[in-house]
Image: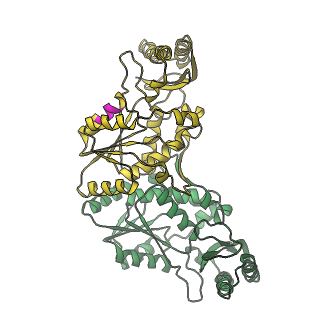
Chain colours: A green, B yellow
Amino acid sequence: MEVIKKLNEMQTRVSSIKERKETIGFVPTMGALHEGHISLMHNARDENDKLIVSIFVNPTQFDNGDDFKSYPRQLDKDIEIAESINVDIVFVPYAEELFKEGFCTYVLQTKLTEPLCGKFRPGHFKGVTTIMTKLFNIIKPDRAYLGQKDYQQNIVIKRLVRDLNMMIDIKVLPTVRDKDGLACSSRNRHLNPQERSNALCIYNSLLKAKSMYSSSIKDANKIIEEMTSIIKSEEYTRIDYVSIVNPNTLEDVSCINGKAVATVAVRVGDTRLIDNIILE
Amino acid sequence: MEVIKKLNEMQTRVSSIKERKETIGFVPTMGALHEGHISLMHNARDENDKLIVSIFVNPTQFDNGDDFKSYPRQLDKDIEIAESINVDIVFVPYAEELFKEGFCTYVLQTKLTEPLCGKFRPGHFKGVTTIMTKLFNIIKPDRAYLGQKDYQQNIVIKRLVRDLNMMIDIKVLPTVRDKDGLACSSRNRHLNPQERSNALCIYNSLLKAKSMYSSSIKDANKIIEEMTSIIKSEEYTRIDYVSIVNPNTLEDVSCINGKAVATVAVRVGDTRLIDNIILE
């Protein structure tokens, strides 16, 4: 396995892979790899000739400097994990090389970035769409792999790829959960034992949504009310949003007709967690 | 020569060119081809295996609906011209295919897009950077060819390519002029004979700048004053700007130290013309 840090080295490697007409699977990450990432890597490994994983804690997508500083970092362990999955290249770019002096070009998406996390994290999605465009241009993947936990981000990236005519197949794989249901997230390691236990209310609220919908309750507000009360019943939780939205437009749904997504963002202590479940 | 209008057909053709490891030269145009475009095409023809020319009057880069409507269009003649230069593919995309329902992703550049034309044409450069990103992603050129007349646009596109990590070599070729010095532009055909004659003041003002600089006048304001008076002495002219700027940052220069660009935008009658000259 190669670990590449320099931009031009990465570009040269990609050119030579392309020369040999090998396909590239890409798993973009911010490191602190967990079972969710591992599932993405296994899938990407199976479906492509080469597997490239990027590890870059992108400063431009953090709306909060403290969150950026405290975001978990464990490069040596991440490299070990990648090696065990037969990753071909781990790309760990330097921020100074990605955002050179005079950097002033951004990719901005409207509409899909406005509700949900967009309301609570100003500038976040601009950071995401910009870095993803850059990484896609550097890695030139045939397929990129994302986890369903980041539902809004996935919809945004799919639209990015469509709107800017990138020829990349975006694969979204199911959220991987701990045994008790908490969605895997690098941020989970910030939770103390009490908070870790409280955080279960998130998945429980999603299960409640699913079961209400299964018993033919289509009134989104009724479901949101129940979900909210499950989350509020736990100490140290603070809700950013509990929403039921159209799976494509991310607009609020009042009466669920066909598919919808129940999606939540909750702060447990100081840690912001997101999760979602599809109602269909 | 092929004329391709459908997006997926263009993408398939590009893939097959890339499969054969042929290089692609790209000349993006809004049609109404003139000697300036022809010079770009000849250069691109010489330096690449395949030459692709796009013709697309991009609605999103017009800040003014009338300007968009009246922009000259002559597809049949353009195709004839391209054929005579041995262009391989003319790409004439449909606006509805490039800007599909729900389109909401834009490429936005700050700094370099703010002065000069950016001040007078709000939204123009956002349209340019967005369409260029899309066309670059569709055509996947090794080299793209632009004319020096659009100085600010070229600087913006070079920065776009650098900032978003596109592997494209941007070639800027000298402005082609009519015998009397007027820079070739599709918009020239809007000028009536009187205006065509008045428009010469633009190039004359640039020549004046060059000669003053050659005789060691470094005070930008002094030069701008002379240029302005040359342009104002002609009837039916209205100045948007007459500026002397740093060739890389496009910031105003007060004392010319080394290289600078004298650049003007002037409305002659209803037609907005731009031109520039490098002082070095």
Q: Is residue B108 left or right of residue B166?
A: right
**What is the quadrant of the N terminus of chain B in the image?**
top left
The image position of residue B116, as x and y in percent, is: 55, 30
Above/below status of B54 relative to A130: above
The residue drawn where x is 53% and y is 15% is B231
* Occupied quadrant, residue B236: top right
The residue drawn where x is 44% and y is 59% is A135
Above/below status of A141 relative to A172: above
The residue drawn where x is 53% and y is 67% is A154
How many numbered circles are shown?
0
Which residues, given as a range, are shown in magenta? B37-41
The residue drawn where x is 57% and y is 80% is A183
Q: Is residue B183 left or right of residue A255?
A: left
Please tell me which residue lies in front, B192 or B130: B192
Please tell me which residue lies in front, B45 or A20: B45
Please tell me which residue lies in front, B80 or B243: B80
The image position of residue A123, as x and y in percent, is: 61, 56
Q: Is residue B261 visible?
A: no
